[in-house]
Image (tube, helix red, strand yellow):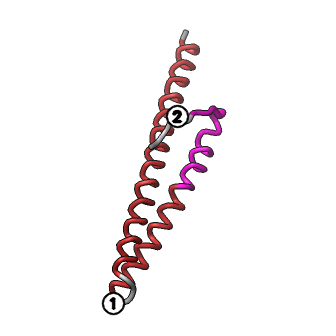
Amino acid sequence: MRVKIAYTVALDEVESETAEIMSRASTDIDAAYQEVINVQNQLDTGTGDIEKNIEAIHFARIKLAKADQILEDCHLILQGLKETKAKLEEQQNEIQDG
């Protein structure tokens, strides 16, 4: 089960904070990639255990799903940042025009 957590950061820290969160996705993607390469090599060479290969593929899929969830969160964070910056710019323009 996933739960939503919230905390605040300064507007100018949102991108670096998002990059930090994305590093978790990168780690999961790397782990999945390594599993896939290992299974592929074992299948190509006829070595390894089928049951372990099935488990490794499952592990890779779980890691990719976790990375996808993290990337979705980052996508939403950056969309919110874009909208916030657009609103701030609009307000600034109204003040200058006003």
Q: Name the residue at 36% across, 77% down.
A: 51
Q: Name the residue at 49% across, 34% down.
A: 82
The CA span between labels 2 and 1 is 50 Å
The residue carrying pointer 1 sits among few (fewer than 14), some (14 to 19) or many (20 or more) residues within 10 Å by Cα, namely few
Residue 86, position in %: x, y? 49, 28
Give the overall secondary structure of the magenta segment.
helix
Q: Name the residue at 54% across, 61% down.
A: 27
Q: Is residue 7 above or below residue 93?
A: below
Name, please, the residue furthest toward the top. Answer: 98
**Amino acid type, mark 2:** Leu
Question: Mark 2 or 1 closer to N-term?
Answer: 1
18 relative to 56 in the view: left or right: right
**Rendered-image quadrant of the C terminus:** top right
The residue carrying pointer 2 sits among few (fewer than 14), some (14 to 19) or many (20 or more) residues within 10 Å by Cα, namely some
**Rendered-image quadrant of the N terminus:** top left
Residue 85, position in %: x, y? 53, 30
On the image, numbered disc 1 is attached to which residue?
A: 46
From the image, state whether disc 2 or disc 1 is nearer to you.
1
**Amino acid type, mark 1:** Gly
Q: Name the residue at 57% across, 20% down.
A: 92
Residue 10, position in %: x, y? 66, 33
4 relative to 68 in the view: left or right: right
Q: Nearer the viewer, residue 55 or 74?
A: 55
Find out whether residue 18 is within the magenta segment: yes
Q: Quadrant of residue 13?
A: top right
Q: Quadrant of residue 53?
A: bottom left
Q: Is residue 23 above or below residue 80?
A: below
Q: Secondary structure at mark 2?
A: helix
On the image, numbered disc 2 is attached to which residue?
A: 81
Find out whether residue 31 is within the magenta segment: no
Task: Please report the bounds of the magenta region as a residue range.
Answer: 6-24
